[in-house]
Amino acid sequence: MLILILIINALSAGQSNDAALKLADKYFDNGLYDHAITEYKRYLFLKPTSPFASQLHQRIAQIYRDQHQWAWAIEAYRQAIACEANDSIQAELEIDLAITYLAASNYSAGEFQLIKTSIYNDDPAIKKRAAFFLSIAALHNHKWDDAEKYFNDYFEYCSDPNLKIEFDSVFQAVRKKKLKSASLAMWLSTLLPGSGQLYVGDYENALNAFALNGVFGYWIGSRLLLKDWGNALLIWHFLARRYYFGNRYHARRIAEEYNQNLKQEEINSILDCLQ
């Protein structure tokens, strides 16, 4: 009787686990990702040694990554790697983990993971994929020599020699473009409002900053010449100060945006070449 009860309980638990997994898949297929994660985690809690454990942790990681919840995605990928017995699939998961690090702007962790995976894996497809994302990480950080090295590693696994020639041309053209110094832009606009924006190449904002601050500078200067200290101070405190410091802040922001856009354009140019 006791054995029969244990068998019935085991069968019931198995059916319950299967039902939880089917429900999770249904939620996932319908785009109810938070509910899907809850059911996947419930299933994994009840059946941590399931043969589907790695796949489910991977699916959870993908959901979190799509939601830009990087820390949760990273932890889920780690769980997926720990549960995976197949070396090839494990290597693919390690690269997915590295990509998540890169997406979270944790470039050092992403690069370390990619290098580690490439060293300990002999599969050409894995090495090619690792080299590609190492190149992208180097581009984001404007490490041109590293980017060139990793792209050369990548092309060792490509069969089209013409693609390498085309890439070299695009890469050298992209490399000549220079980033703007956000600190220099700010200090230029500190000395002469609008000059930081002019340095970045934003002529419209440069003119606006110069004109507005010029008007306030003239107004304050005229008050000072008349020894109208009180009104000069009021104009500075309530009007001019805001525009002056705003001009410095915006010069820095515009330079940072310029750099970000330039980096993205560079990466897009290279990706277009490789497609």
Image (cartoon, grey):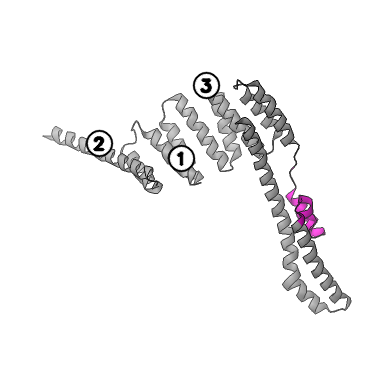
| Closer to viewer: mark 2 or mark 1 | 1
Residue 197 placement: quadrant:
bottom right
The kind of residue tagged 1 is: Gln
Type of amino acid under label 3: Asp
Q: Residue at x 55, y 39 (%)?
A: 101
Q: Quadrant of residue 114?
A: top right
Query: Which residue is disc 2 drawn over?
Result: 14
Q: Is residue 175 visible?
A: yes
User: Which of the marked residues, 2 or 1, is nearer the chain's N terminus?
Assistant: 2
Indicate left or right for 189 with 129 as reference: right
Which residues are drawn in magenta? 178-203
- Of labels 3 and 1, earlier in sequence is 1
* Kind of residue at badge 2: Gly
What is the CA distance from the residue labelled 3 to the residue labelled 1? 24 Å
Residue at numbered disc 1: 62
Q: Rate crowding at label 3 as few (under 14), some (14 to 19) or many (20 or more) other CA atoms within 10 Å.
A: few
